Image (spheres, rainbow, N blue to C red):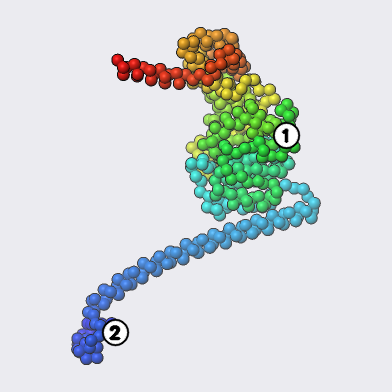
């Protein structure tokens, strides 16, 4: 008996050396080891390919499952909204509450809304907290509201449940738009969605003119509400305070009220009283134009993801008569200069309002005319003393037309440049 140690590839069978001279003569024959080696490498490749295919199929199944879930909840949501409308029509009830909706966590999962740090995204999932924020705004029944940065829509729901009739939401991140559209379908005709940057958005023409109240009347039925992104909260409130002063933007409608969240430290600065540790430029700028109230603090753990800080809810009502009757930019210049040396006597910062050659004389004149003690610390200066300083500075600017555009940093730069030039020449 001869060993079958060869493989005939033409007939696909094992053969012996004798066979290659007879039945399998001139056939394509390989050694047993060669053939096994080829099969092994072939099987190895097939196994890798199969694993890839299985992985692809699994991913596909997951995708299909997700779309099915999404379709189910979209259909369910639409169905609930329709039922709700029919119910309201048939019973003739004029209720403005939303129909039952998927939770905010479900919306986040369905649309895969992972928070993005660069857009300061920290979501509020607890609707009792968002309801509490909305209650600080006052009665929203049939009101117009602009919500800044609605994200997955927690605060948005609370605003709608409070009865807002016209809610304009401004959101920069396009990933949130489909979820907001669902919400808009659940509250037909009550939600307008703007995909854009709130810093560039013109609010002066966003609401109907009939809302407008005169400045000394009651505030209009228009509110700005937002769980603001930390990254834009300070520039945004400065922009809105400036618009409040010039009665432009959202304030063309009258004394529009604002209910906003800030990092707790910023909320404390906004509301800090004269003499307190947190008193700053922001305190004076906000308080000379509005009544500012730090309503309550939300612990960081209430947000997803949890920020490193707690959050303060602040309510602003513009004053009928601002405490300082000077242009915003002028007040800001005086206040900024005073606070630039916050541990020094106030005359130190005020000196920087004047060119070096007249610095001491003009600072003395300013402080005398405003009747303010030069040795007061910036935090100890009251709003009425800031009014006196701004009025006195305005008088000096009227007497000297180049004074307002004077910038001590520019003079300092020029001086350094001249000094370098002289050094080079000698
Ligand atoms: C702190 S999250 C709040 C989200 C939601 N309101 C909540 O309470 O869960 C801030 C939101 O503002 C949005 N946002 C950030 N910068 C913005 C901008 N410049 N204009 C409009 N929205 C902005 C973010 O995309 C995010 O949705």
User: For the point 56% across and 60% down, which residue is it?
Assistant: 67
The numbered mark at residue 212 is 1
As drawn, which residue projects farthest toward the bottom? 22
Residue 189: percent from left, percent from top: 70, 49
Tell which circle, 2 or 1, labels the residue nearer the N-terminal end: 2
Q: Quadrant of residue 281?
A: top right
Q: In which quarter of the image is the N terminus?
A: bottom left
Residue 134 in view (yes/no):
no
Q: Quadrant of ligand 1?
A: top right
212 displayed left or right of 395 = right
Q: Which of 133 and 202 is in front in this view?
A: 202
Percent position (x, y) of residue 421? 35, 19
Q: Against 74, is 272 above or below?
A: above
> What crowding class fits label 2: few (fewer than 14 Cα within 10 Å), some (14-19), or many (20 or more)?
few
Marking on residue 91: none
List the residue tagged with mark 2: 10
**What kind of element bears circle 1?**
loop
Residue at the image position 58 percent from the left and 31 percent from the top: 239
Quarter of the image for residue 135 reads: top right
Along the viewing direction, whichever of 364 and 19 lies nearer the viewer = 364
Mark 2 vs mark 1, CA separation in Å: 93 Å
User: In the figure, 335 relative to 241: above or below?
Assistant: above
| Point 53% across, 42% down: residue | 122
- Position of 401 relative to 155 (above/below): above
302 to the left or right of 28: right
Q: Determine whether, in the image, residue 343 is placed left or right of residue 395.
A: left
Foreground of the two, 257 or 245? 245
Residue 323 image point, x, y percent = 65, 20
Q: Can residue 50 be seen in this view?
A: yes
């Amino acid at each position: 008996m001869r060993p079958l140690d060869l493989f005939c590839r033409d007939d696909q069978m094992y053969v012996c050396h004798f066979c290659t001279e007879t039945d399998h003569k001139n056939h394509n024959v390989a050694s047993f080891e060669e053939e096994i080696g080829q099969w092994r490498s072939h099987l190895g490749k097939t196994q890798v390919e199969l694993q890839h295919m299985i992985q692809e199929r699994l991913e596909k199944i997951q995708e299909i499952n997700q779309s099915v879930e999404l379709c189910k909840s979209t259909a369910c949501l639409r169905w609930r909204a329709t039922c709700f409308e029919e119910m309201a029509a048939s019973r003739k009830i004029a209720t403005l509450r939303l129909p039952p909706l998927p939770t905010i966590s479900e919306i986040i999962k369905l649309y895969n809304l992972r928070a993005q740090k660069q857009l300061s995204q920290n979501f509020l999932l607890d609707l009792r907290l968002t309801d509490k924020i909305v209650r600080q705004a006052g009665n929203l029944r049939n009101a117009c509201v602009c919500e800044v940065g609605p994200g997955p829509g927690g605060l948005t729901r609370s605003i709608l449940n409070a009865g807002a009739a016209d809610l304009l939401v401004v959101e920069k991140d396009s990933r949130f738009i489909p979820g907001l559209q669902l919400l808009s379908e659940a509250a037909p005709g009550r939600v307008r969605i703007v995909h854009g940057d709130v810093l560039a958005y013109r609010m002066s023409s966003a609401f109907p003119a009939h809302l407008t109240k005169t400045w000394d009347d009651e505030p209009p039925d228009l509110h700005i509400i937002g769980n603001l992104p930390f990254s834009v909260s300070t520039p945004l409130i400065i922009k809105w305070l400036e618009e409040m002063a010039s009665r432009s933007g959202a304030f063309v409608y009258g004394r529009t009220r604002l209910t906003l969240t800030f990092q707790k430290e910023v909320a404390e600065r906004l509301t800090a009283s004269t003499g307190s540790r947190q008193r700053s430029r922001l305190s004076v700028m906000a308080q000379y134009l509005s009544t500012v109230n730090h309503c309550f603090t939300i612990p960081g753990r209430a947000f997803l993801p949890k920020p490193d800080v707690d959050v303060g809810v602040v309510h602003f009502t513009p004053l009928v008569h601002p405490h300082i009757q000077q242009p915003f930019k002028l007040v800001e210049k005086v206040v900024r200069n005073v606070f630039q040396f916050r541990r020094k006597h106030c005359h130190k910062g005020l000196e920087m309002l004047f060119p070096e050659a007249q610095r001491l004389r003009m600072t003395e004149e300013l402080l005398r005319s405003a009747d303010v003690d030069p040795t007061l610390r910036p935090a100890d200066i009251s709003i009425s003393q800031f009014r006196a300083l701004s009025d006195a500075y305005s008088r000096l600017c009227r007497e000297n037309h180049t004074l307002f555009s004077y910038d001590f940093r520019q003079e300092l730069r020029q001086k350094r440049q001249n000094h370098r030039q002289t050094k080079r020449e000698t």
